[in-house]
Image (cartoon, coloured by chain):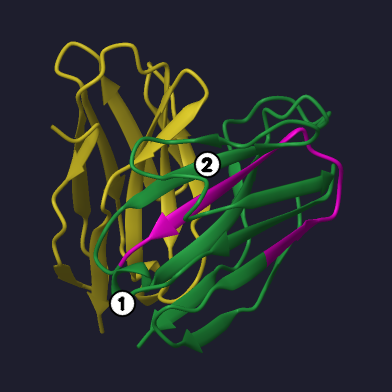
Chain colours: A yellow, B green
Amino acid sequence: RKEVEQDPGPFNVPEGATVAFNCTYSNSASQSFFWYRQDCRKEPKLLMSVYSSGNEDGRFTAQLNRASQYISLLIRDSKLSDSATYLCVALVGNQFYFGTGTSLTVIP
Amino acid sequence: SAVISQKPSRDICQRGTSLTIQCQVDSQVTMMFWYRQQPGQSLTLIATANQGSEATYESGFVIDKFPISRPNLTFSTLTVSNMSPEDSSIYLCSVSSADPHMSRGYTGELFFGEGSRLTVL
């Protein structure tokens, strides 16, 4: 079983829509979680860390459910510039485990 | 954030040859990580390069196939040896904000180079 699993999508949403991505992790010892954004042919970049109480950064909200081993990312009022692949990441010890990513395309 | 430069950015190679990828960081780091991202796949850690010691390889990766050098605290190389089409991938160099040399405080952030896109014919 993969350490981190994501729905690969693709998600095609109209501009202004709200979209949610889900991610599950298999190792209950995972201590930290992150969402990274990867644009086409570019390297991944940190979007936000996921705190146990949930956290919000502008239009982006991340939540963690340790009981269900589940992480989510909510994007409100989608912009064209949000089109990218979103990677869910779990940190276990000193190692980062990446999901395969969820592809998002925001359509005008 | 750390600035990481990788060379080459892309290359097309013949089966059976070897390619060395260079990674330069703008600050000293204890650990440098080498990842592979195959088409449609997640990032997979190949090995961790520590200055002054042998690299630590993950399951499925061996030193003979992916020799790594780490001559100082700002530089590392990854060689892909005896290449086959299955080695076609993006290879990414990375450092962590949790590195003992970084005084920024732990944010859990991995900084990546722009990647080296390798195509093996």
Q: Which mark is residue B85?
A: 1
Residue A50 at x, y = what percent?
Answer: 41, 29
* Residue A72 appears left or right of B5: left
Q: Nearer the viewer, residue B94 or A105?
A: B94
* Amino acid type, residue under disc 2 in the picture: Ala
Q: Chain of mark 2?
A: B
Mark 2 crowd level (few <14, some 14–19, many ≥20, 10 Å Cα):
many
Q: Position of residue B118 (x, y in %)?
A: 46, 77
The C terminus of chain B appears in which quarter of the rendering? bottom left
Whether residue B8 is visible here, answered yes or no, is yes
> Is residue B60 part of the magenta span, yes or no?
no
B30 left or right of A83 in image: right
Question: Foreground: B61 or A4?
Answer: B61
Q: Nearer the viewer, mark 1 or mark 2?
A: 1
User: Is residue A91 shown above or below B71?
Assistant: above
Most frequent secondary structure within the magenta stretch: strand
Kindly report the distance in space between the C-alpha atoms of the residues bearing marks 1 and 2. Answer: 21 Å
Q: Quadrant of residue A74?
A: top left
- What residue is pinned by disc 2? B47
A75 relative position to A49: left or right: left
Q: Is residue B83 above or below residue A67?
A: below
Magenta-tinted stretch: B22-38
The chain holding disc 1 is B
Label 2: state its secondary structure: strand
Identify the residue at image location x=45%, y=70%.
B82
Element at label 1: helix
Q: Is B40 on the left or on the right of A43, as rendered?
A: left
Percent from the top left, x then y, of residue B72?
86, 45
